[in-house]
Image: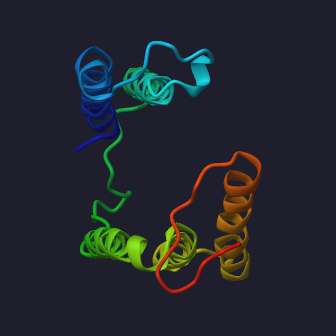
Amino acid sequence: MSEKSLHLRLGIFTSLFALFLVLFAIPTFVFAPSNVGNIILSPLFWPYVLAGLTGVIGLGLLASAFKPGANVPFEDEEGTAHPERAAPWLRLAALGVIMVLVMFGLPRLGMVWTAMLAFAACAFLFRTRHPIVALVCAVIVPLLLYAFFAHVAGVAIPQGNFVRLP
């Protein structure tokens, strides 16, 4: 499969998926009160933003499929395929396991602690070149988000059964 055909297929699928979201899924399944004064606070705003960005990415993939020199196969000069055939699928399966563990850990550990563990697990699963920075971010980012949403915005963040944050 060439880069052109891959981008063409992904672009068509992504664009059609964005149209499905905008025309059917968001109006059908996202409920919003009619008296929301600020559009950013409306439950419809961010799904439409994400659907629009998905459409833009799909159109970008379609545009890149028709650029000159895009019909290059994914094999190197010798004609041999990528030596790691099973590794991407194993990482995908491990990511699925992490997602299941996140769903299992949310009610028990709370959102902040589960996010810390999931961030660190994903960083090491994808073999980051900066493991210390990844661990620091895994701790700091969820704590800063918790501090903002719980203490500034006044939004209740789900706490776990074992440890509660102030």
Residue 120 visible at all = yes
Relative horizontal placement of residue 114, taking residue 62 as reference (left or right): right
Q: Residue at x 53, y 70 (%)?
A: 159
Q: What is the x, y in percent for residue 137?
A: 70, 70
Choose between 160 and 64: the one closer to the eye. Answer: 160
Q: What is the x, y in percent for residue 14?
A: 31, 30
Q: Residue at x 75, y 55 (%)?
A: 151
Count of picture labels: 0
Q: Residue at x 52, y 78 (%)?
A: 117
Q: Which quadrant would the C terminus be assigned to in this image?
A: bottom right
Relative horizontal placement of residue 86, taking residue 136 as reference (left or right): left
**Is residue 79 positioned above or below 107 on the image?**
above
Residue 67 visible at all = no
Q: Which quadrant would the N terminus be assigned to in this image?
A: top left
Q: What is the x, y in percent for residue 97?
A: 29, 75
Q: Residue at x 61, y 49 (%)?
A: 155
What coloring was used for the rendering? rainbow
Q: Quadrant of residue 25?
A: top left
Choose between 80 and 134: the one closer to the eye. Answer: 134
Relative horizontal placement of residue 6, taking residue 161 as reference (left or right): left
Q: What is the x, y in percent for residue 81?
A: 27, 64
**Is residue 136 positioned above or below 151 on the image?**
below
